[in-house]
Structures are given as C-alpha cells and as structure tokens.
C-alpha cells in the first residue's frame, strides 16, 4: 500500500474524530480479531513469555505490546486509509460521476484494501460461517494475517489490469524497488568483492548470513520461490505436524524419521520468543546452527538464514537430478552431527567450533573416528557417488553454475583447514575427555 507519511508522526486515535467514525463505518477494522492478534504478536516476540513474568520488566513489556498492537498499528492503519482515500476517489471519479459507483462504494473498497495490507480483516462484513472460521483458526498459525496476506497478493495481481487493486500494486512495486535497491547497494558496499547478490533480491548478505526484513515483496518472493516452506511456516503447529507425519518431509522438504517427527512436534510447543534462551534454543534447534541473537532477531521480524557456499551447490544438484532422471533424495534431518562444527568454522568462530568438537566427542568412540568422521562429512561426494559427481560436473555449462561449484569446493577446503587448526588447540582437552570416558567404562 503506497504511503508517504512518517510512522513517527502518527497521532493517537480519537474515537470522537469524524474521520475515524466514517472509516470504521465503511469497514476499516481497527480493533482486530483478538485471537489472531495474540498469535501475530507471538510471531513478533509477543505472547506470554519469561519477560512478562520478570519483576519490573513484565509490566513494561505488556505496556509496550499494548501500545504497539492496540494503539500504534491501528493509528498507522487509519492514517494510511485517510491518505489513500482521496487517491481512490480520484481514480473512480468517472464511475462516481456516471452513477456506477457511489462515494460509499469507494470507501468500502479502500477499507478493504487497507485491511488486506495490514491484517485485521473485518469478519462482520465478510460474513463467514463461524464454524468455518474455527476450522481455519485450527489449521493456520495466524489466520487473520495469513488470509489478509494472500488477499493482498491477489489485489497486487489484479491491479495490473483493474482499478481495484491498483493502489496495492503501486505499493508492492514501490516496496520492491526501494527495499531491493537498498539491499543491493548495501551488499555492494559491505561485500569484499562488491557483489550485490542479485540472487537474493531483498536481503543483505554479510559474513555468511542472510538478513531479510519481513515485507510484502519478500513474502511474495518466498511464496513463489519456496511454496512448500512458505506454506509450512503459516499453518498451525497441529496442521504442520500432521502434514509432516503424512508426507515424511519437514518444513524444508527434507526427509524425516518417525522419531524426528515426534521431536519436531514437541519442539513446536516452544514459543518463538522464548527460543533465544540457550537451553530452549538447543532443544528447538538440536544442530544449533543459530545463535541466541539470531533467534531474537527472527522473533522480531528480521529473518536470519545461512549463506553457505557449500549449501549453494545442492540446489544445482537437485535441478540436475530432476532433469537427468536421477533419483532425488533430499536427505534426512538432521543432515549431519558435524553440521554445527562446520557452520561455526564457516562463520570464522573458532571458539564455538572447539566447543562443538568437544560436544561431538560424546557420540564418538575415539579421536580418530571423530577426525575421520568430520573429514568424510566435509568431502563426501556431492551427489552421493563419484560417478554421479562426474556426470553432475560435466552438466554444468554456464559460468555462474561453474563458479557456484568452484566456490563450494573451495569452501570445503577452507573448512577442513580451519578444522585442523581448531583440532590442534582442542586436542589436549579431547585426549583428557576420552581418557576419562575410558576410565569410567573400565570401572563399570
């Protein structure tokens, strides 16, 4: 939704304001669905968390969330409606003059567009059967906002050929242009090689991590590029668990065992905003590939993912397998017990890598098995076999694809060299740990 006002100059809503009364009369939803709001606020770090229970902090957190979701966002929404309405009146002036539409009709359309853009649908006007709405609530994570998001995408598409939705389309294009340009400029500045990372249109890539601010343009891109992940991230924990159990695939599309399905179901009960707590973070993310800070950022609307040169090779492999008729196997989750070590080394965090090496020692019989196991995990065949690797490499024809593979192989070598450096430093502690294990076993 296109707007030019500053969110820092939004005034508090006055129920006695005629503009407020007229907007709500024509369908602008400012109070919202309380249950949907609770779920939405949980996704942005809200809900009842330990912060609410902390003395001296809980009241402040609750007050902030009440201001944000019940005062600030509704005020922004009303301000946006008041700014968009004159443009919509001008857009439909011919229809109003001919009698095909009335000013009230335009106000209803404008309220609908703003509701779709911000969420808080007006279910009274929609007139949906309550039973159907209860089913939708049980099946989706935040039904109000998910439905509004999808309907807003529909308006974005409709605006290309119809006046109804034109405002939403302009807003989407403006958002995509501004955020896309800002991300590309930032990437070109901070990347050592000046790479703007066009393959990630709305994200900033830095030190092996991808940072993305939630917005309608990036949401639409994710829906198009990764529909399975987009869907699984928006259905309810119950629905996603049933889908995972029925398909044998997790939210990333990877194969999972029955035991891993049970584990995933259990960890979904952990609120997003509490996953920054170390113990809960380890439980929710057994491979521990995200930090507490990254979990905190994700719970507040900034998604953090990994930009690993090694991982970038696998989409090429999946594409090659699909085209060549090779069996496509997405692997089993977790991918490898050595994954936290590799990610720490890719991040250049030697201290964390040493801790993860010591942690991995708990499941390995001796140092040699641990050393050999990590090396095999790093240099395993890309496709699962040497013959497959040869065919895959021969299939790469574009300079871009060849560069991706070359970068992935170079990254493997860097990881192995970094591992050997960390290994030398942690070897004495490892030896002591294995001697202690051997002594404990002998004493039993």
Image (cartoon, helix red, strand yellow):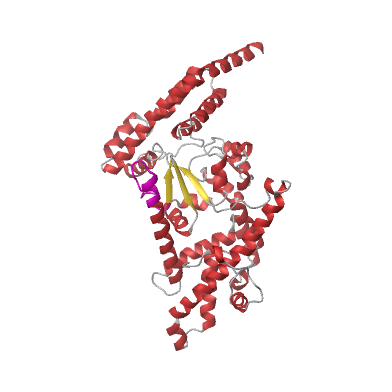
Q: Name the outermost residue toward the front.
A: 9
Q: Residue at x 57, y 23 (%)?
A: 362
Closer to us: 42 or 101: 42
Magenta residue span: 185-202
**Which residue occupies 46% across, 25% down?**
374
| Left or right placement of residue 408 versus residue 143 in this view | left
Q: From what the image shows, is residue 8 above or below residue 261?
A: below
Q: Is residue 331 magenta?
A: no
For the image, the number of numbered tags is 0
Q: Can the viewer see residue 329 in this picture?
A: yes
Residue 198 in magenta stretch: yes
Q: Is residue 229 above or below residue 329?
A: below
The answer to which quarter of the image holds residue 135 is bottom right
Magenta-colored segment: predominant secondary structure: loop
Question: In the rendered view of the protein, which quadrant contains the C terminus?
Answer: top right
For residue 217, side relative to residue 244 (left or right): left
Give the quarter of the image for residue 118: bottom right
Q: Position of residue 205 (x, y in %)?
A: 42, 45
Q: Position of residue 277 (x, y in %)?
A: 63, 40
Q: Position of residue 421 (x, y in %)?
A: 44, 23
Q: Nearer the viewer, residue 192 or 362?
A: 192
Q: Residue at 54% across / 15% down in the picture? A: 431
Q: Residue furthest bottom?
A: 98
In this rendering, the answer to whether 70 lies above or below 83 is above
- x%, y% of residue 112? 54, 71
Of the pair 164 and 294, the residue shown nearer to us: 294
Residue 380 visible in the displayed image? no
């Amino acid at each position: 939704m296109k707007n030019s006002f500053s969110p820092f100059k939004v005034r508090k809503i006055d129920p006695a304001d005629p503009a407020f009364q007229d907007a709500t009369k024509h369908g602008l939803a400012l109070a919202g669905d309380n249950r949907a709001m609770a779920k939405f606020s949980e996704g942005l770090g809200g809900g009842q968390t330990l912060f609410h229970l902390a003395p001296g902090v809980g009241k402040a957190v609750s007050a902030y969330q009440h201001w944000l979701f019940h005062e600030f966002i509704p005020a922004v929404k009303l301000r946006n409606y008041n700014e968009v309405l004159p443009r919509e009146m001008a857009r439909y002036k011919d229809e109003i003059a001919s009698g095909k539409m009335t000013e009230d009709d335009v106000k209803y359309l404008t309220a609908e567009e703003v509701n779709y853009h911000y969420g808080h649908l007006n279910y009274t006007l929609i007139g949906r059967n309550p039973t159907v709405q209860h089913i939708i609530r049980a099946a989706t994570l935040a039904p109000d906002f998910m439905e509004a998001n999808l309907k807003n995408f529909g308006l974005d598409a409709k605006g290309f050929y119809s006046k109804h939705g034109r405002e939403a389309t302009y807003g989407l294009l403006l958002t995509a242009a501004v955020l896309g340009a800002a991300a590309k400029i930032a990437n070109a500045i901070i990347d050592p090689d000046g790479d703007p990372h066009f393959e990630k249109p709305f994200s900033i890539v830095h030190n092996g991590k991808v940072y993305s601010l939630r917005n309608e343009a990036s949401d639409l891109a994710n829906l198009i590029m990764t529909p399975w992940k987009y869907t699984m991230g928006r259905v309810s924990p119950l629905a996603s668990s049933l889908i995972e159990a029925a398909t044998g695939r997790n939210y990333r599309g990877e194969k999972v065992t029955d035991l891993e399905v049970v584990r995933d179901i259990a960890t979904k009960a952990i609120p997003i905003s509490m996953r920054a707590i170390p113990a809960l973070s380890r439980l929710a993310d057994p491979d521990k590939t995200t930090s507490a800070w990254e979990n905190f950022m994700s719970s507040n609307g900034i998604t953090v993912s990994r930009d690993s040169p090694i991982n970038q090779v696998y989409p090429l492999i999946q594409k090659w397998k699909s085209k060549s008729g090779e069996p496509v196997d997405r692997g089993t989750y977790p991918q490898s017990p050595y994954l936290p070590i590799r990610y720490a080394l890719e991040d250049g965090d030697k201290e964390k890598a040493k801790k993860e090496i010591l942690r991995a020692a708990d499941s390995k019989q001796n140092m040699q098995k641990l050393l050999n196991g990590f090396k095999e995990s790093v240099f395993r065949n890309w496709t699962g076999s040497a013959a497959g690797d040869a065919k895959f490499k021969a299939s790469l024809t574009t300079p871009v694809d060849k560069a991706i593979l070359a970068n992935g192989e170079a990254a493997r070598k860097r990881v192995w060299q970094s591992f050997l450096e960390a290994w030398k430093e942690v070897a004495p502690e490892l030896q002591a740990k294995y001697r202690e294990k051997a002594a404990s076993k002998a004493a039993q």
